[in-house]
């Protein structure tokens, strides 16, 4: 949760609107405008990638981090402005508690603070960048490569993906197994694996052995996601080896979209 300093810490901070003392009418108008501004920010945050489930990442890790930092700075800055208004309200109370506008000003301040607190709570509920990262897993035991080699060689290639990555509820990077990247896609309680980066060993014209990346992805058949929800990467590998697999040769635009989506998911992995 984002730490906010106690009310009053910014007691000497002048509010953003002006360094001059506000009149009662000006303060009342400023508080109402501030509340409207915070309500607008709340709507912006709700529509932001920060408020999306982590599994539906639309940004790379560095982009997500920058966005989170920007929002944290904006909210903290508006908190300083709110504290400036708090000092103004106190000043009016000390000078003239029987002021005709004091009760309206006090209510406007409390309404503004309640709205700001809701915004602060919403941001605190967004995943911190570091909380979205998962360890990088690399396993080389030969089984997945062997399984995929047989599949790619014997199964007829489909022309379209079996799963629309743009509509999935979660796209999770599991790890790299035998140089093949393994991802889990989840949609409406059903899941499948997708594998990318298949390497095929060939001999070129000069007789040298070269590794080529197969321009296809491999999708597994779907299954109930509850079966694998708490699997370790090794258990995911063991399970995918039991599934029927289908290689997919996507159209160029679809292929680009899929690879970009997978790259975003992978960008959240970290080396331990």
Image (cartoon, helix red, strand yellow):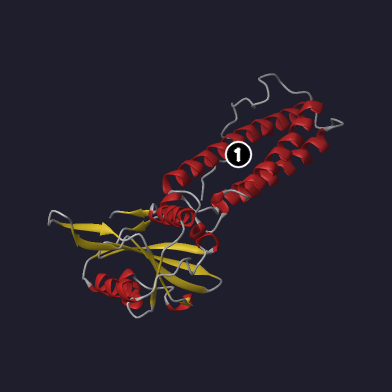
- The residue sitting at 77% across, 36% down in the picture is 32
- Write down the residue under mark 1: 7
In the rendered image, the vertical position of residue 120 relative to residue 168, given as above or below: above
In-image side of 208 versus 72 (left or right): left
In the rendered image, the vertical position of residue 269 relative to residue 99, given as above or below: below
Quadrant assignment, res 229: bottom left
Q: Depth check: 31 or 233 in front? A: 233
Q: Is residue 89 visible?
A: yes
Q: Residue furthest right?
A: 100
In-image side of 239 versus 99 (left or right): left
Quadrant assignment, res 16: top right
Sort mark 1 into few (<14), some (14-19) or many (20+) by Cα contacts within 10 Å.
Answer: some
Q: How many marks?
A: 1
Q: Is residue 5 visible?
A: no
In the rendered image, the vertical position of residue 242 relative to residue 177, given as above or below: below
Percent coordinates x, y for residue 118 in the rendering:
65, 49
Q: Depth check: 92 or 131 in front? A: 131
Q: Secondary structure at mark 1?
A: loop
Q: Depth check: 141 or 131 in front? A: 141
């Amino acid at each position: 949760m984002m730490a906010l300093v106690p009310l009053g810490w910014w007691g000497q901070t002048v509010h953003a609107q002006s360094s001059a003392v506000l009149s009662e009418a000006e303060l009342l108008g400023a508080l109402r405008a501030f509340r409207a501004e915070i309500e607008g920010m709340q709507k912006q945050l709700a529509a932001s990638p920060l408020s999306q489930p982590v599994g539906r990442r639309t940004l790379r890790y560095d982009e997500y981090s920058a966005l989170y930092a920007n929002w944290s700075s904006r909210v903290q800055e508006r908190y300083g402005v709110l504290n400036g208004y708090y000092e103004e309200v106190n000043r009016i109370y000390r000078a003239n508690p029987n002021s005709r506008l004091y009760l309206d000003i006090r209510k406007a301040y409390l309404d503004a603070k309640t709205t700001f607190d809701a915004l602060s709570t919403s941001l605190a509920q967004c995943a911190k960048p570091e909380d979205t990262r998962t360890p990088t897993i690399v396993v080389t035991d030969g089984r997945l490569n062997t399984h995929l080699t047989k599949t790619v060689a014997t199964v007829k290639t489909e022309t379209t993906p079996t799963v629309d990555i743009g509509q999935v509820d979660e796209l999770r990077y599991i790890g790299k197994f035998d140089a093949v990247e393994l991802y889990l896609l989840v949609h409406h309680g059903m899941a499948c694996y997708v594998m990318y980066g298949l390497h095929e060993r060939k001999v070129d014209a000069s007789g040298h052995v070269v590794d080529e990346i197969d321009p296809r992805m491999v999708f597994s058949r779907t299954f109930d996601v509850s079966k694998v929800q708490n699997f370790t990467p090794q258990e995911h590998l063991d399970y995918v080896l039991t599934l029927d697999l289908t290689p997919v040769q996507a159209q160029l635009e679809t292929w680009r979209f899929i690879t970009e989506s997978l790259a975003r998911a992978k960008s959240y992995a970290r080396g331990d």
